[in-house]
Image (cartoon, coloured by chain):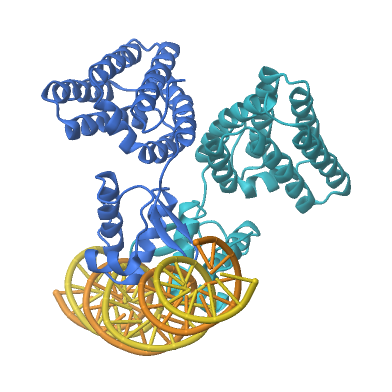
Chain colours: A blue, B cyan, C yellow, D orange
Amino acid sequence: MVPKTVLHLAAENLRQAIFNGVFQPGERLVEADLCSRLDISRASLREALRILAAEKLITLVPNRGPSVASISWAEAEEIYDVRAMLEGEAAFRAATRLDAGALREMRAALVEFERAVARRDPAGRLGATARFYDAMLGGCESAVIAELLQGLVARITFLRARSMQRAGRARESAGELRRLLACLEARDASGARAAAIDHVHRACAAARAAFPGVRAA
Amino acid sequence: MVPKTVLHLAAENLRQAIFNGVFQPGERLVEADLCSRLDISRASLREALRILAAEKLITLVPNRGPSVASISWAEAEEIYDVRAMLEGEAAFRAATRLDAGALREMRAALVEFERAVARRDPAGRLGATARFYDAMLGGCESAVIAELLQGLVARITFLRARSMQRAGRARESAGELRRLLACLEARDASGARAAAIDHVHRACAAARAAFPGVRAA
DNA sequence: AAAATATGATTGTCAGACAATGCTGTCAAG
DNA sequence: CTTGACAGCATTGTCTGACAATCATATTTT
């Protein structure tokens, strides 16, 4: 399922390293370093870097080389806004298209999420959320929406992780997803859209509170 | 303004070649060929290809190499749908944010567009449209929306060119843009959103009619 | 005719090289 | 003491050439 070429593996490694904070936002990367760390040639590395640059996880400036992307709150907020719009639309479409299997999958993912919340397991939460959304996006029958959302969410991964650590946010989040799922199961498209948008807005608020150096709006 | 590195130039060349139909959709590209045509090394070429792949202008399958992306009508329609949503939002935001200079620029672009229509100048039409939208997106103060739209529009460039050739479509299009601009000048955000969405929907319909092998809906 | 195999084309990956550009710190001039 | 020119190092941009892995096609075998 994942391409097995060296450069894709390298890209995946770097991606995880960035998500896990091995490299700080804004930090400059040096090709030679990465090459020896990943044990690949510069040619392959540079291709991997192009992939990450396309995902906006790194910035690639000619003659200055790669650096880890850093995001301003303004930009993060824009992403949340667009995400709300797209995710709302996805929910709307999914409400009338999801089959029983997909709904079951979503419910299972939600249960898993709640377990992870109770267990205070950050990785588990992220995984369960991904499962939940994958099922919904798979059923919304718009590869374009799914693709754009995936790209946007990747760019705020670390914000999500951080904001989830706020007391009570994870539990709130579970409730919001539960409501969204209820609308989907009831085939209430408009309700699903509203629930999805509401969830993103609340996630955005939580992220704002956790963002370094931003006061309330 | 455009990066002057060899690989960016190559990417731009290939982009134009694809837009201009030098390569047919689905056609397989051969690295060695492209290298000699562009007179660059394989390493640089492959980086350029990664850029185009990120823009979805080509498909890059491991061990099978690059081929020009081909789009199904279903996918094109998804793109038009999302484009309508985003462009509507952009118009909504722009209505309350555009300054006088930007509005003037848009009006100038519209005049240019109408001249190009009268002159039956396809390249002129595309250029003027780009100018029009650049001004609007610049004023909507959402780099994310602008960025996503740019990506989506690039993927349907050849559809736009083709559908514009339908008798009367270009003139209609001018009228729709004129209405959109009128709303923006009147600071009517909701009207602007509606006008923008309507314009995209009509463009979509025109594209459908021009799409090879698709009947009416 | 179908399956198996051999052959050639193409991609994936590497190593090493060198010029162009960017960065840093020294030194001289104001 | 600050500023600016300059030298030297670090890093990137790009190329060449190579070889193994994989794919595609033609040929042979069953």
Quadrant of the snapshot with the C terminus of chain B: top right
Question: Left or right of A20: which side holds A71?
Answer: right
Can you say whether A23 is above or below A153 in the image?
below
Q: How many marks?
A: 0
Q: Residue at x 64, y 45 (%)?
A: B159
Furthest residue in direction left, as rendered? A119
Q: Is residue A147 at all visible to an observer of this figure? A: yes
Residue at 17% x, 32% y is A124
What percent of the width, then of the height, locates residue A46?
38, 65
In the rendered view of the protein, which quadrant contains the N terminus of chain B? bottom right
Residue A11 point in image, percent of width and height = 31, 56
The image position of residue A119, as x and y in percent, is 11, 24
Residue B77: where, in percent of width, then height?
55, 35
A46 displayed left or right of B24: left
Q: Quadrant of residue C7?
A: bottom left
In the displayed structure, B77 sits above or below A34; it is: above
Q: Is residue A183 above or below residue B176?
A: above
**Viewer-nearest residue: B114 or B4:** B4
State the residue in front, A11 or B177: A11
